[in-house]
Image (spheres, coloured by chain):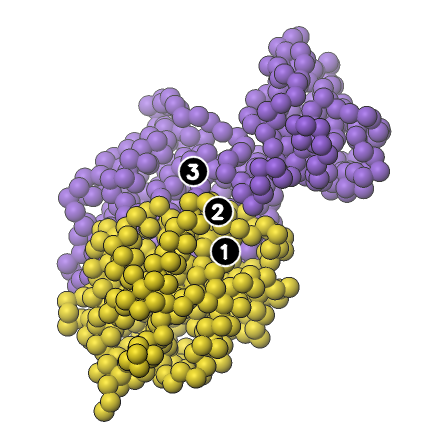
Chain colours: A purple, B yellow
């Protein structure tokens, strides 16, 4: 597996003033200069991807990821239309966009890509890319902010993004496009009259920037709800970008931070901050919020409780065990708990033997594609492809824990509870995944598995 | 010059699903239908307005969100494609519409003289929001009437429902006065849903009506209460209960359109006609008409 990483993180403001009229206010010019400095730093790095998380692109149906290879249009700000227009023509890394979308879904998120002529790329993304990447030297990807997402969902969104960065070996720059305090003046002002809207907003902004200059990104993540209450006007999205950015940096608190500029834009707090992954030497702090790898929250709301076909927590059935820590055992919290006293895998020489792997998700035990029967034993409709994909993903996580990967799988025995119904779908996913690796395979029909799943695989791989 | 007047006021919700389901030539996606209860409701509204003589449609949409005052489109000819950033799979509409800039400016000037923060939008590259387009299209798909497009000032976000309503009451009075002085006959559209809690997943196809319902019983109760108040002419009570409605039903009337409409009609005690009610991706939507042109005859 290739190694990818975040090589730089940025916090930048969304307003069009630094693009359209920096000369009208010294502060706006300083923001423009800071944007230019951030651009130079990116150009001098070996970055090959810019990832934008924009608070000005709200979404309802999960998260949306821009997948048009070349979005082009003219952007006019809803409020500051008198400043002029910005013609944009962006270069999107569509392979990454689709892979991120797929990774989101595999981690339990609602997600989709968008690729439509005339799609209105939001002002924040346009401004950030115009100033950080004016000639499209580096491809970008843009993600929306879901109006209903909580910290768990936003964290998982970042983790799935990191999955793809690592898989594709990207050297990525993560960008949160956002204001600090977002209270603007509600009336027109002259440029020279601009200032932070209130002393309280300014003091909170200064405190946020003090933390960021010390590299304490996760501390800001944990303070986000308080910050939102104190200095954020309740617009459609809350102060979520720090959750995303912190998770993109493994929830660290010892980054190397530098504030390049902090100025008012029509009363809001605009800052350009650069966070480098090098440790600032202070030592990391405790991460004291629940970590979450898979999202099992408020989804399937279209279905009644009696008709859950997409995913269902395994709240009945066999007891679950912590994986056995025996000789040469390989266990991981990223795979579902066993239904008996055995490890996830065992290493012998240069071979790894996996216990039977099903599609259950670690954490909440939900079953992608839905369970095959309800608590009363009544059969349910389920998606064998989603289940099979989840099995392969679980296998990949166990192998990764063992220092191996799907590429090293040499033999698989698959078990299906309904060969007639499911072989075709299972076979299709196999062809897309393990089939490309080329292990030997045996597929058996069996009467039942211990949990309400349709497919399980027994795997042998090389280290 | 004869005095202008508001000949009808309408609650005209704008979920893009309605245009998508109608399959007009201007919209790129193609559907198998869906949301018929509401689309038939709009059909009844169009029938009701068929013989009403009017010059202009004045619409306030919560999807042109402005934080620095209330804005008015001041460009006479607007042609482009409006793509919904939330449901781009459903709404990619090629529009070609005419703005009554004269009336827009008159309302702007009147509101300004009353101390409101207002601005004319005169950038020709500006794209008209999908809320404005959906409501206008569903009411008048011929697009043969000029419109006045008013933004939704998000004063609720900055202050409170009470402040928002105070400002929208003033904007409503300014709108009515400017219309009266213009000599024009106008249909007013408040472009918003009632309860506004969405589902966060989408069916495949989106028009699968077997999955469409209100998100919760509480939302249903609020929607029915508001409709009943409208049907019984209790506009002032709607305004009085707006803070609770906005908070508990996450109502889209938080954008101010309904309050503006009621104020422009001088907070009517006359009943509104319900043309249709239905849910769209879980949100509650009612098509209501206050037939102002008949009130003087009674």
Q: Is A430 situated above or below A136?
A: above
Q: Local crowd at mark 2 within 10 Å, few (<14), some, or many (≥20)? A: many
Seen from this angle, which residue lies furthest top? A327
User: Element at badge 3?
Assistant: loop
What residue is pinned by disc 3? A150
Q: Is A280 situated above or below A194?
A: above
Q: Local crowd at mark 1 within 10 Å, few (<14), some, or many (≥20)? A: many
What residue is pinned by disc 2? B215
Q: How many marks?
A: 3
Q: Is residue B156 left or right of residue A7?
A: left
Q: Residue B279: give its label.
A: 1
Closest to the camera, between mark 3 and mark 1, is 1
Q: Chain of mark 3?
A: A
Can I make out residue B247 in this image?
yes
- Marks 3 and 1 in Cβ contact (< 8 Å): no
Q: Chain of mark 1?
A: B
Q: CA distance from mark 2 to mark 3?
A: 19 Å
Horizontal and vertical percent position of residue A162: 52, 37
User: Element at badge 2?
Assistant: loop
What's the residue at 50%, 58% (across, down)?
B278
Q: Is residue A318 left or right of residue A271?
A: right
Q: Chain of mark 2?
A: B
**Residue toward you, B295 or B139:** B295
Q: Is A324 situated above or below B111?
A: above
Horizontal and vertical percent position of residue A69: 56, 58
Can I make out residue A52 in this image?
no
- Marks 1 and 2 in Cβ contact (< 8 Å): yes
């Amino acid at each position: 597996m290739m190694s990818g990483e975040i090589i730089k993180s940025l916090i930048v403001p969304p307003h069009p003033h630094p693009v359209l009229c920096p000369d009208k206010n010294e502060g706006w010019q300083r923001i423009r200069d800071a944007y230019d400095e951030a651009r130079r730093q990116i150009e001098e790095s070996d970055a090959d991807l810019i990832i934008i998380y924009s608070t000005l692109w709200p979404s309802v149906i999960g998260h949306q990821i821009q997948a048009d290879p070349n979005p082009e249009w003219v952007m006019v700000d809803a409020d500051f239309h008198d400043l002029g227009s910005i013609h944009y023509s962006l270069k999107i890394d569509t392979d990454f966009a689709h892979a991120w979308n797929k990774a989101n879904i595999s981690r339990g998120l609602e997600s989709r890509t968008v690729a439509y002529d005339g799609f209105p790329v939001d002002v924040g993304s346009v401004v950030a890319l115009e100033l950080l990447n004016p000639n499209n030297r580096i491809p970008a990807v843009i993600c929306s902010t879901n109006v209903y997402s909580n910290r768990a969902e936003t964290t998982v969104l970042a983790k799935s993004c990191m999955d793809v960065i690592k898989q594709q070996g990207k050297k990525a720059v993560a960008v949160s496009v956002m204001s600090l305090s977002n209270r603007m003046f509600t009336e027109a002002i002259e440029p020279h009259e601009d200032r932070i809207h209130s002393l309280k907003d300014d003091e909170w902004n200064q405190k946020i920037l003090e933390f960021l200059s010390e590299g304490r990104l996760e501390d800001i993540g944990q303070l986000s709800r308080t910050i939102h209450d104190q200095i954020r006007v309740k617009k459609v999205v809350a102060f979520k970008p720090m959750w995303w950015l912190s998770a993109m940096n493994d929830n660290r608190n010892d980054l190397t931070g530098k504030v390049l500029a902090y100025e008012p834009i029509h009363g809001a707090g605009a800052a350009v901050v650069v966070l480098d992954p090098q440790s600032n030497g202070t030592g990391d702090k405790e991460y004291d919020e629940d970590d979450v790898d898979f999202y099992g929250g408020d989804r399937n709301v279209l279905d009644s409780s009696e008709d859950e076909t997409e995913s269902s927590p395994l709240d009945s059935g066999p007891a679950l065990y912590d994986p056995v820590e025996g000789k040469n055992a390989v266990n991981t919290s990223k795979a579902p708990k066993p239904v008996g006293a055995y490890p996830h895998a065992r290493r012998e020489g240069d071979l790894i033997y996996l216990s039977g792997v099903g599609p259950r998700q670690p954490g909440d035990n939900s079953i992608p594609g839905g369970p095959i029967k309800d608590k009363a034993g009544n059969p349910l409709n389920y998606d064998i492809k989603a289940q099979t994909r989840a099995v392969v993903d679980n296998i990949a996580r166990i192998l990764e824990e063992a220092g191996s990967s799907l590429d090293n799988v040499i033999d698989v025995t698959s078990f299906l509870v309904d060969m007639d119904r499911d072989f075709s779908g299972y076979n299709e996913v196999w062809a897309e995944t393990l089939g490309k690796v080329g292990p030997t395979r045996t597929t058996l029909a069996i009467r039942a598995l211990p949990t309400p799943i349709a497919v399980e695989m027994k795997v042998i791989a090389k280290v | 010059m004869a005095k202008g007047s508001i000949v009808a006021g309408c609650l005209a919700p704008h979920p893009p699903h309605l245009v998508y389901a109608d399959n007009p030539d201007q919209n790129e996606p193609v559907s198998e239908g869906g949301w018929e209860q509401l689309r038939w409701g709009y059909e009844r509204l169009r029938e009701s307005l068929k013989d009403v003589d009017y010059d202009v449609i004045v619409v306030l949409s919560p999807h042109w969100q402005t934080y620095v005052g209330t804005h008015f489109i001041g460009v006479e000819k607007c042609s482009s494609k409006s793509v919904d950033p939330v449901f781009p799979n459903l709404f990619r509409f090629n529009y070609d519409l005419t703005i009554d800039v004269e009336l827009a400016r008159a309302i702007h000037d009147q509101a300004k003289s009353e101390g409101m923060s207002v601005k004319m939008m005169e950038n020709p590259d500006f794209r008209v929001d999908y809320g404005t387009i959906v409501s206008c299209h569903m009411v008048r798909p011929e697009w043969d009437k000029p419109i006045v497009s008013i933004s939704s000032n998000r004063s609720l976000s900055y202050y409170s429902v009470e402040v928002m309503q105070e400002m929208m009451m003033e904007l409503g009075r300014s709108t009515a006065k400017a219309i009266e002085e213009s000599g024009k006959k106008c249909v007013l559209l408040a472009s918003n849903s009632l309860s506004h809690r969405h589902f966060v997943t989408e069916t495949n196809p989106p028009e699968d009506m077997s999955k469409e319902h209100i998100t919760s019983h509480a939302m249903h109760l609020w929607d029915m209460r508001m409709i009943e108040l409208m049907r019984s002419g209790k506009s002032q009570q709607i305004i009085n209960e707006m803070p609770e409605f906005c908070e508990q039903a996450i109502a889209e009337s938080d954008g101010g359109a309904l309050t503006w409409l009621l104020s422009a009609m001088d907070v009517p005690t006359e009943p509104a006609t319900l043309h249709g009610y239905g849910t769209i991706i879980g949100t509650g939507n009612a098509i209501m008409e206050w037939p102002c042109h008949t009130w003087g005859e009674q």
